[in-house]
Amino acid sequence: MSLEITLTVNGKTHTAALEPSTALVDFLRDTLGYKGVKLCCNTGECGACTIIMDGKPVNSCVVLGLDAAGADLVTVEGIADGDELHPVQQAFIDTGAVQCGYCTPGFIVSLKALLDRTKSPTAEDVEEAISGNICRCTGYTKIFDAVELAAKRMS
Amino acid sequence: MAKAEYTVLGTDMPRKGGVERVVGKGVYGIDLNLPDALSGGVLRSEHAHAKIVGIDTSEAKAIPGVRAVVTAADAPDVRYGRSYIDRYILARDKVRYMGDPVAAVAADSQALVKEALGKIKVTYEPLPVVVDPEETMKESAPTIHEDMPLPKNLPEGVQVKNVCGYAAVNIGDAEAAMSEADVVVDEVYETKMIHPQYLEPRIAAARPEEDGRLTVWANAQAPFPVRTEVASLTGLPLNSVRVISTGIGGGFGGKGSGVTSSAGLEPICALLALTAKQPVMIVMDKAEETISTTIRSGCKIWIKTGAKKDGTLVARQGKVVYDAGGYSGFGNQAGGRCTQMVGGWYRLPNIHMDGFTVYTNKQVCGPVRGPGGPQATFAMESHMDSLAAELGMDPIEFRLKNVPEKGDGIVGVPKLRDSSLAETLNTAKEKIGWGKVKLEKNQGIGFATGAWIEGAGPGGGAVVKMNEDGSATVHIGKVDYGTAAPFGIPMIVAEVLGISTDDVTVLNVDTDASPWDAGTVGSRSMLVSGNAVKLAAEDARDQILRMAAGQLEASPEDLEIVERQIQVKGAPSRSVSLASVCNAGHNEIGDVIGRGYFDSKASQADERERGSSQPFTTHAALVEVDADTGNVKVLKYVAVHDVGFVVHPKAVEGQIEGAAAMSLGQALCEQVVHDGDGRTLNPTFVDYLMPTINMLPRIEAVTVSGYPGAGPYGTKGAGEIGSVPPMACIANAIYNATGVRVRRLPLSPENVLRALREAGK
């Protein structure tokens, strides 16, 4: 039994069919083609599939696709302004925070959500915002650097 | 360190491919779009040790939409392995761990794959299971491999079983020297299995082509070994297999050397595609990976060292039992390296070590980041602290008393050309504030040194092809997962050719086009591909300068390339553009194609002659132990490294910080837990704890310079050595804070609290 839903992703309206059991991450990747949303743990632990859903960051692997009916989503593909990178994206490049880059979309989305909430986050705010994102390459040091650089450039 | 004579080297050029990755356009294996591909999946053993009595696939095959069901009977009777050739891609006759692949299915959808896997009926006859590496060596233990002999080099009279590797260190006369020591410390240490837990799941895809060839896509670190293994294990000629490397989301050795690291995923996928005569793609589930792919082994280490009253080391004896798992995998290599490293890297004239790598009914050892080294160092450097305490010496002074110097030999290195160990110790002491920082109650500082001996190993090639606009296209055999390929490699090409890194494209590995390479493993990207690409770029430059010499009426030696202009040295107005020469070259020599190869044999001969410069490190940690909960908080962490010449500072720091973080995870929380039946109790990320940003301090990576290594411009490998000291470093800091030594990993709240309680604290 497949059902049809309508939702907005990065400002674009999509109407598509899905099975009731389909996770939002699979719907976004396989049906709508947003492959910047990364698949990993399927248990909501690693943050690689983080998207912004109605203003809040969520792990799209533990959200049913059906729950996104009528929702307004932002994925990593919708964060840059055309060719102009978001300060967080540019800072990840400038500080060497991108190694393999697989966790990067999740971090960028989590941080974008944080910076949408507050323009001058404290170190605790940053830790809290990305404590659900796992990176195995960097040891987080360069990610800290990236957040600081982005916040400085935005203020 | 950046040297003035270089234009590109020593700068922090943005990562190649960085923009794609931050906007979500980075394409990884999991993003591969293969039209009309079937979904594939693997049936894994539910027993840790059992005979396979029969496999009935008829019901699975009868499901509409199921296109292929394969078992060992469908594959050639060929095994694979490293030192022990002991494993089939699909288990034949017996399964040896819970997760061993038994059958595989390709079908029109993932749901059909799952359904079909559930319909395959395997009849097992369960056998006794052994998960403890010490138990498995006993005569009473079940035999895991009936037809595998004990190692040929096993000393006479040693009564063991299930041993698949033996390594020894014999230097001087340890037994006699031990009796002359003033102080002897004898300890036992234990480490647990961890999984590398790269974030991108393993994938494999295979497509039979119209001409009879097979194209394989793999997110593996070593595409050429994958090609060899796909060919031999499916029965195809080597030249009928083409392996294309996808983008890779982490690996850390877990996606290492072909099938040795991937539980045979690529050959299984190839077998499915050849059977179905259609493209097939397999994506592993993370929990499936945790129970079935390769890991950093647990091990038990006995270490006994004697020293004189003044702190001079005189003798060491010890033993390592290293858990290979159900198959030998990388166990012999990692266990051997572990055994050597327990011998240490200090001046120590008398050492005897025995190292046994053993089969158990658990998942298989792989070449995970610094294979064998972090475990050895947890024991060896904790033990050095115990010795310092017993001698009543400062831990830094005790180590400095015993550091090797220029001309000394250490285990695995006959002659050192120089030694940076003392400098890293002194720098770490300074940076952490040893003796200066005021420690609060339950706070402590710990140090641990490390080494990662770069030695013999395969060579590898590079090709630099010039385009008519003066840009360069580079072929190497190393993959891009955020190490040298997108950082140091393009910088070397740009430096040699007088162009910008924007003008350099480093291609992904395609075995039909790329030069052969053993893989992106062993901290060898700069050593192998860096040296090769430097020679290839120089070869291309020489061809260009020879052609330009005629136009500029100068000899090639008098020319240089600066910012895409070829000019006469000292007379820059006499110049011609690089592009015009490359373009004109089409009518003279064809494409300018430079070729280079890292000559491993020549490099080793040179090191024998002149001695070798090895990377050394010291890490320092400031921790606070919660005496009520056993929780350890790392407040400050400094990692001082000699990695020779630094081509890209941020990339090198990133390698050090990431490697340290992975072992800090093993120090504080990570472990794969098995029950007595060999079942993994924590396969998902819900139960398998890894460090998050709020668990770790900002790691301060510091490099010391002046000790050039065997890499291009004097680089040394930086990818693994950072993972070597952290476990001992944290254990030593806990000892400094509490006076209690924890000899068993992880240093988790429960283990630390137990140790504190046992010590009456």
Image (cartoon, rainbow, N blue to C red):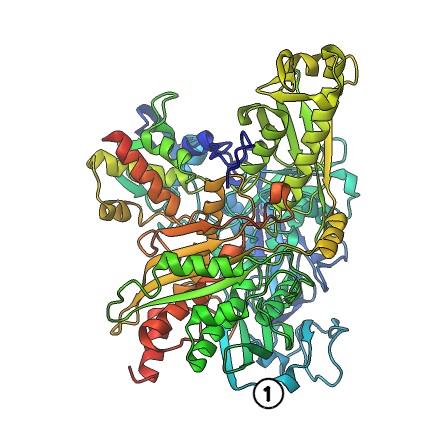
Q: Position of residue B609 (x, y in %)?
A: 74, 55
Question: Image quarter for residue A101?
Answer: top left
Residue closest to the eye, A139 or B264: A139
The residue shown at (59%, 21%) is B562
Question: Looking at the picture, which amino acid does disc 1 mark?
Answer: Glu
B282 vs B378: above or below: above
Q: Single out the residue that lies furthest toward the bottom.
A: B179
Instruction: Check disc 1: other Cα within 10 Å, few if <14, some if 14-19, many if 20+.
Output: some
The residue shown at (73%, 59%) is B79
Question: Image quarter for residue A120?
Answer: top left
B18 vs B694: above or below: above
Residue B423 horizontal side relative to residue B699, left or right: right
**Which residue is label 1 attached to?**
B180
Residue B502 horizontal side relative to residue B760, left or right: right
Question: Image quarter for residue A113?
Answer: top left
- Chain bearing tag 1 is B
Tell me, yes or no, if residue B208 can be seen here. no
The residue shown at (65%, 37%) is B278
Q: Position of residue B496 (x, y in %)?
A: 63, 29
B740 vs B45: above or below: below
Q: Secondary structure at mark 1?
A: loop
Total marks placed: 1
Q: Position of residue A77 (x, y in %)?
A: 38, 29
Tell me, yes or no, if residue B153 can be seen here. yes
Q: Quadrant of the C terminus of chain B?
A: bottom left
Q: Position of residue B279 (x, y in %)?
A: 63, 37
